[in-house]
Image (cartoon, rainbow, N blue to C red):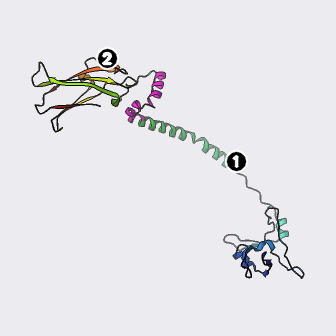
Amino acid sequence: MYTQCPECLTIYKIAAATLAEGHGSMRCGHCAAVFDALRTLTEHLPPEPVQHLLTHTGDGALPQLSVPALRPTPNQQATLFDPDERQQRPTPRRAHTPAFARAQRTRSHTRNWPWAVGAAVLLFSLLAQIGYAERAPLLDDAQVRPWLDRACAELGCLLPLRHDPARLELLSRDIRPHPSVPNALIISATLRNDADFHQAWPEVEITLSDLDENRIAMRRFQPQEYLGDSRNIASGMASGATAALVFEVADPGKNAVAFEFKFL
């Protein structure tokens, strides 16, 4: 086979192994140009004088090989093909699936639906358990709570009041000796709900400390301990409402000179 450099027009004799090694690309030994050897590849030289080899041009469509010469098969010797024998050989037909196999496949698909229903029930049960375990954060979440309120209104259920201690504002506080109980103190505070919703009464933590801010005494009060009316506890604090709270505690001694409120 022969090919021609398009730069210096040098014609080279080329072997198939050399052509395969460069994947069709060659470097000219005369002008060092890199060119596509397949464009002018030919088996025989045209009659002299030779100026240009015929350049192969295509329409972009790949030529299709139709006559096989050799096809190796696994664990067997390579099979040589005779074109005439290949044309006479009948085309193998695709085997049809037996009727009993099709019926078995249909029955297997039919039996799968109980598994799908069981998986859906288990998934719903898992989501319900997660929701119950995380019910407190979900009930107080500002984005989730409106959806829960609407769903509960449709179902006729009653949700607990929301709880957001950060929206409670301590307006005033005072501590003084108890007028009728010896060795006791009365601590009073005024509380306001700055949230835009009714919220539950908080758990109140009162800490007494000395001048060095060392804790001397601490107690937590539940709503039923500082509110006597159970209906008031159930209704919660209205938005913008204020409440006066009174707490009776034992006097920890003269070192208790400071006190602190915390809403939980």
Task: Give percent across and percent down for residue 79.
Answer: 75, 72
Q: Secondary structure at mark 1?
A: helix
Task: Give percent across and percent down for residue 132.
Answer: 40, 33
Tag of residue 260: none
User: What residue type is disc 2 on?
Assistant: Arg
Residue appearing at x 60%, y 45% in the figure: 108
Residue appearing at x 71%, y 79% in the figure: 32
Magenta region, residue range: 131-155
Tag of residue 99: 1
- State left or right for residue 4 relative to residue 198: right
Instruction: Determine the main secondary structure of the stretch shown in magenta.
Output: helix
Tell me the crowding category of disc 1: few under 14, some 14 to 19, or many 20 or more residues within 10 angstroms, Cα based. few
Quarter of the figure that contains the C terminus = top left
Which quadrant of the structure image shows residue 259? top left
Tag of residue 231: 2
Q: Depth check: 72 or 171 in front? A: 171
Residue at mark 1 to residue at mark 2: CA–CA distance: 74 Å
Quarter of the figure that contains the N terminus = bottom right
